[in-house]
Structures are given as structure tokens and as C-alpha cells.
Image: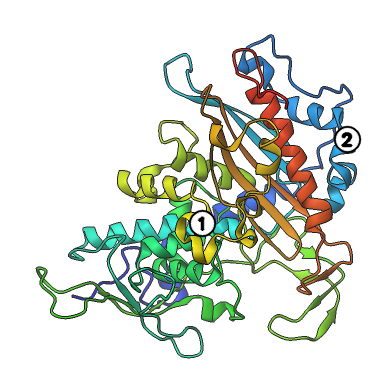
Amino acid sequence: MRFVSPMRTSAPRTPAARRPLARALATGLLAALIAPGSRAAETLPAAPAAIPDASTGPAERFAPGWLAAALRGQPERFGDALARPDARRTQVRVAVVDASGPDGQPRWFVDTFRPDAEYFYPASAVKLPAAAAALGEMRAYAAAGATGLGRETPLVFEALPGISAAYARDPTAADGRVTLAWEIRKALVVSDNDAYNRLFEFAGHRAVNERLWRAGLPTARITHRFNVVRTPEQNRRSPAVRAFFEGRWRGRGRPFERPAMVSDLGLPPLEQAGLDVGTAYIEPGGTTRVEGPMSFREKCALSLSDLQRLLAAIVLPTLDVGVDRQALGLDDADRAFLRTTLGEAPAELSPTRWGGAEYAETRFRPTLGGVLKVRPRPALEVRGKAGRAYGFHVENAYYRDRRTGRSFFLAAAVYANDDGVLNDGRYEYGRVSEPFFTALGELVARAVFDAPGGRRRRKP
């Protein structure tokens, strides 16, 4: 049995025949991206405060303005990211969760610093929306008659000449099988770029974007593979994918088989402040230095708000964050699988392959080091997906104190590239973004976890 994408990405069409939905969603995407770019950069309030007043309830303690005031109260800890937020493209969004709202349902209190002031490259943080879209497409194929298709179904990705090689065996998997479950775990836990590419190929260029737009994430723009140089046209192409079974197929009907697809979704160039980055760049895939800024108009984009709301929709399904979970297409088991995976450490995938110091958990969770100054690791529930590339460093995390049940979401972006040259592999993550994230994690954790009623960690 051969399946056409449930999002109808496989058949090329003329521009006149494109669906009205695509035009409407693209228009909404541009509107969402243009509007933030026109906003003036937020300025810090004059009144300093290191931690919100702990004598009041969460609605008062975390009222809009507390975050910027807390940052200003400790400027020496945040360096250039706070002193020159325009140059560092610093953006922060914190959502403090109140588990017992007035109607018995959880709610959150959101505060921001310089939200959407300019473009930032989301890097590997987009692997979470790609994983969600791939699972949504898998469920849609199964509903359309793909017998037995699931997260653990062994798959073969056929070759797409000049774009991607065939992939039928995975040497990192214990049984050598290629499955969506294992590709998602690699993409989210150890940030494997090839695994992300296969999720992008399985969902398809059109479906990965439309599914996220329909779910209420209008700034989502997933346009390309990672760690390979491909043209926009090549990135709109996806290889054939089929279920792979050694020996005789014993299921009913025929196993899943989807033909190669070409997306006709036209994504216009981004229009947002700060899309020209740096003063020079190394030509992708080469060594030639090109003078002048690198344009990010054709690259991936996703606002901190949409990144955080998607994470919250997966981690806390009863929290109303404005995401249409039904439109994502995940069933309860898929959501639970993503939630579990977002909390895994690299060594849990394979202690021999990903258990060394190079794969320390703090490498993949940049604010964790700061939170650990407030609570020990066994007391924490931690979930999220960060990313960094081209000097952009992005965090998208959830922290919960297991002892008190208090929790918060923390998303932030910082640019750390002092020489202005992109794609040269020389960035100031260790000197600029990592200390900023550590200080930010500690500040927010102390504000949320150390309020009255919470158990403070004893000093040694």
C-alpha cells in the first residue's frame, strides 16, 4: 500500500492551484514576524530587585516587570548580555507555573525581557517541533490505513540522489533498526543533526510547517536540513520512506510505503529586524571568506514564545498555553514519549557511546548549572531542548522542584560572536552565553523555588 502525505505534500502543483490554507498561513506567518521586528527594544526599569517579594502570592510576585527588575538588581552577573542587549540580541521569557489555579487547573505567569526585539537563529531548538510534526504525520498515515505504523516500526529511507543517501541500518541502535522513536531520542537528547534531517524528511517540508501553524505556532518556519549544504529547492524534497521487515510480512494488508515528495509550499523571505548578521562569513561547505553580513532570510525561525508554548503543551498537557494539541496530531502515548525523551540525559541512550565528559548534561542544558546552585540534581525534574549555531545560543527548558512541586519554564537567546565572522567555528559561548545562562538559571530558580513554603537547599 502506498500512501500520499496526509498533509498533501507529495504532488507538485502550479502556484494557481495552491491551497488557500497555505496562502493564509504564510500571510499570518509574515504578520507575526513583521510585527515583533518593529518593536522598540525594551529598557530596564529603574527600581532594582534581586528576587520578587516573597510575602505575596505568585500572581503578585511574578507580575510583569519582575524579571527585568531582577536582572537590573545584579548587572555584574550578566555581563554584555545585559549591558549591551541589542548587540548580544538578548531575549528572555520566563513562565512561572501555579499548579493550583482558582478553577483547580494550573496556570502560568509570563514575563519577558526584550521579547521579539530582533531575529535570533533557533538552531537545534527546532528539533523539538520537527519531532512533534513527524509523530503527527505518523499518526495521520496510520489513520489513513498504514497498517502497524508506529514509533517503533523499522523504516528505510530511500536515496534521493544529490540530496540524501539511503538509510536502512543504524549502527547506534541496539538492534540496528531505524525507527522514529530512536531518531527522535537522538535528535532531542544528543542533538544529532542527521537524526533531525530524517525527521524533517519524514514529515516533509510542507507538513512540518503547516502542522505547527495549525497548532497555533505562527512564527514556526522549518526550512532546511542541518549540517549539509542544500538549496531551498532541494530542501523541499523528501525521499521515499517504507517500512522494513526482515523476512515475510505477516501483518494485514501491505506494510507502509510512502513515495518521494516535493513540497510546493512557498515560504517568502523573512521580514524582521536583524536578519543580516555579522560582518563576514565562511561560505557554507567551503573555505572562502565572503565580506559582508550573512542573510538569515531563508533560514529557520521560531519565536521564544512559540518555542516555550510548544514545550509546555508537551510537558504539562493540562496547562492552557494557546496550543491546539489536537492539531499537532499526537496521541497521549506520543506526548508522553516526547515528555520522557525531553528529560533524558545522553548517558541514558548509551553509556558507552554518550556517557563521557563530552556529553555532560549541562552541555545540552545551558541553564542547568545555575539551577544546580539552588537545588541538587536528584531534587529536580528537568526537560527541554536547547541549541547553538552561528554564535546564537538558545535555551528552552522546564524545571520543577520535586520537593515542593514548584516549577517554571525558561527560554532565552543570546548572540556570542565577537569577531563578527560566521561559520568559522570560533564563537564566545564559553565566555559570554554560558556564564549568562548559568546566572539566569540561578536567578530564576531562587526566585521560584526559595519563596515561603519551599525547602531551601542547605549550604555546605
Callout in the foreground (2, 1): 1
The colour style of the image is rainbow
Q: Nearer the viewer, residue 407 or 361?
A: 361
Residue 138 image point, x, y percent: 32, 61
Residue marked by disc 1: 347
Q: Nearer the viewer, residue 242 or 211?
A: 242
Residue marked by disc 2: 75
The amino acid type found where label 2 is placed reads Pro
- Report the residue at 88% width, 44% height from top: 79
Q: Earlier in the sequence, mark 2 or mark 1?
A: 2
Residue 262 image point, x, y percent: 42, 78
Q: Which quadrant of the view contains residue 436?
A: top right
In the displayed structure image, the side of residue 250 where residue 159 appears, left or right: right
The amino acid type found where label 1 is placed reads Ala
In the displayed structure image, the side of residue 387 where residue 432 appears, left or right: right
Q: CA distance from mark 2 to mark 1?
A: 36 Å
- Report the residue at 64% width, 25% height from top: 448
The crowd level at tag 2 (other Cα within 10 Å; few <14, some 14-19, many 20+) is some
Using the rendered image of the protein, determine whether residue 331 is visible from the camera's viewpoint: no
Residue 8 versus residue 322 in the image, above or below: below
Disc number at residue 165?
none
As drawn, the residue found furthest toward the front would be: 460
As drawn, the residue found furthest toward the top would be: 55
- Report the residue at 61% width, 46% height from top: 396
Q: Name the image quarter holding the C terminus.
A: top right
Residue 218 image point, x, y percent: 54, 50
In the displayed structure image, the side of residue 116 where residue 79 appears, left or right: right
Quick one: SS at disc 1? helix
Residue 251 image point, x, y percent: 11, 69
Q: Nearer the viewer, residue 330 or 28?
A: 330
In the displayed structure image, the side of residue 171 where residue 305 appears, left or right: right
